[in-house]
Amino acid sequence: MKLFTRVFIAGICLSLISHSYAKSDFSATASKLENAVKHQRRTASETARDQNRKPVDTLEFFRFRDDMTVLELLPGGGWYTRLLAPVLEEKGKLYIAMGAERIANTLIGQEGFNSLSLIPFERSNYIRTAGNYRASLNNFNFDIKAKQVDLTLTFRNLHNFDAQGRRAMNDAIYKVLKPGGLYGVVDHTKRHMQANQSELRRRMDPVQVIQEIEASGFEFIDYSTLHFRADDELRYEVGRKTVTGNTDRFTLLFRRPN
């Protein structure tokens, strides 16, 4: 089933090769990213994850550039935020939203983070269903001008929401992206069509994710094997010792049509 999932995704991408998607030069952005990765403000625990997360390669795949307006969702402790914001300092803008208040309070006003702004997110948008390990979301809009964002990113977060919640988030992202804007997603892999269970609660079926994001109006344009891990059997909760830090993750890129 893992092979089927990968072949299915590859087949979709091959069907799209006739489309032309501009890829501007990455060298200037790469230089800034390398500087952000090596900066002394990063802690040892942050740098220890670089080899696994491959931030420069991952952001290059997502066509991140230093002059973009970027929206990062559910930034958690700000691991990617601490790399994105300094790169965007001179020519770009970084918004963070959804559970982002704590990291915003930590970073906004600090040297190297002048590009960073918080989009407040009402906690009343979250719906917690008894007995469900995934939250849901009411339909909502980000408090930001429509069609302003070049790139939206979310790393290992879709699994936090049920189908209704993911649809609400994907719809809201579509509204703020510019025509031609990009939406990059990374999450832990689940076998195609495997039933939900607590052991797999932080894994997602990538085929299902593609179908859901397309249902919000996006075009699926590319995928990467950067975070493919052949020795992850896709059987265990991602926090277990046998797979933590080495989970197989899908890396997908979508586009809002012109």
Image (tube, rainbow, N blue to C red):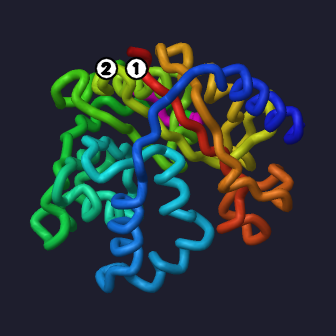
Residue extent of the magenta highlight: 131-138
Q: Quadrant of residue 122?
A: top left
The residue under the point 51% across, 29% down is: 254
* Residue 79: numbered disc: none
- Label 1 close to label 2 by CB (< 8 Å): yes
Residue beneath disc 2: 175
Q: Quadrant of residue 148?
A: top left
- Is residue 121 visible to the viewer in this orientation of the structure? yes
Residue 43 image position (x, y, % from top left): 39, 82
Q: Amino acid at mark 2?
A: Lys
Residue 67 in magenta?
no
Crowd band around label 2 with a 10 angstrom C-alpha radius: few (<14), some (14–19), many (20+): some
Q: Nearer the viewer, residue 242 or 256?
A: 256
The residue under the point 31% across, 41% down is: 71
Q: Is residue 195 above or below residue 31?
A: above
- Compared across the picture, whether 210 is left or right of 50 comes to right
The residue under the point 39% across, 57% down is: 76
Label 2 sits on a secondary structure element that is: helix
Q: Is residue 123 above or below residue 25?
A: above
